[in-house]
Image: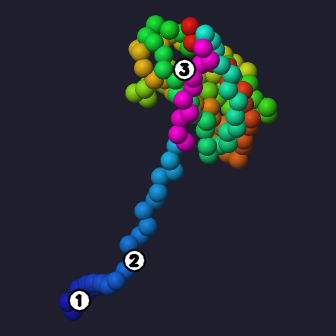
Amino acid sequence: ATAAHYGLVITINNATPAPTATPVPSPAAERIRFPRGATSVTLTGYVDSYTPARYVLRALRGQTMTVSLNTLYENDTTVSVYDERGYFLGTASRGQTWSGYLPSTGDYFVEVRAPSGNTSDNFSLWLEIR
């Protein structure tokens, strides 16, 4: 006996294409402006595990940025600092301070983020440029 070979071709007409995922946009960064003559500012806000708080500020090469984060709850909320190209410069957790040298003149991004999972937090962020 010889083996039989069969093929199956399925054609679906008028099929709706599979939906494409829509990326969730990052929240826009809020521009920080220091009061005249001030070198520091305190920002307050709310974050959850899906929506960080993002800030942007202009600083000069050679200046030092210091950030300190306090939160209402004891979650592992963090603050991270990036340069305008997205390079990570440093981070601090709740109750900690980070300080670092700024390598170039330009915009710097500061992001407060709650830990993953179903968590949220109210925060107070102190930021200084010297």
For the C terminus, the quadrant is: top right
- Of the numbered discs in the image, which one, if any, rests on residue 16? 2
Look at the picture and state if 109 lies above or below 13: above
Viewer-nearest of labels 2 and 1?
2
Range drawn in magenta? 27-36
Task: Residue type at mark 1: give it.
Answer: Ala
Which of the two discs, 3 and 1, labels the residue nearer the N terminus?
1
Q: How far apart are marks 3 and 1 (CA)?
A: 67 Å
- Of the numbered discs in the image, which one, if any, rests on residue 90? 3
Q: What is the crowding at mark 2: few (fewer than 14 residues within 10 Å), some, or many (at least 20)?
A: few
For the residue labelled by badge 1, is the local secondary structure a helix, a strand or a loop? loop
Task: Residue type at mark 3: give it.
Answer: Gly
Residue depicted at x 50% and y 8%: 63
Q: What is the crowding at mark 3: few (fewer than 14 residues within 10 Å), some, or many (at least 20)?
A: some
Q: Distance between the residues labelled 2 and 3?
A: 47 Å
Q: Can you identify the residue that label 1 sits on? A: 4
Which of the two discs, 2 and 3, labels the residue nearer the N terminus?
2
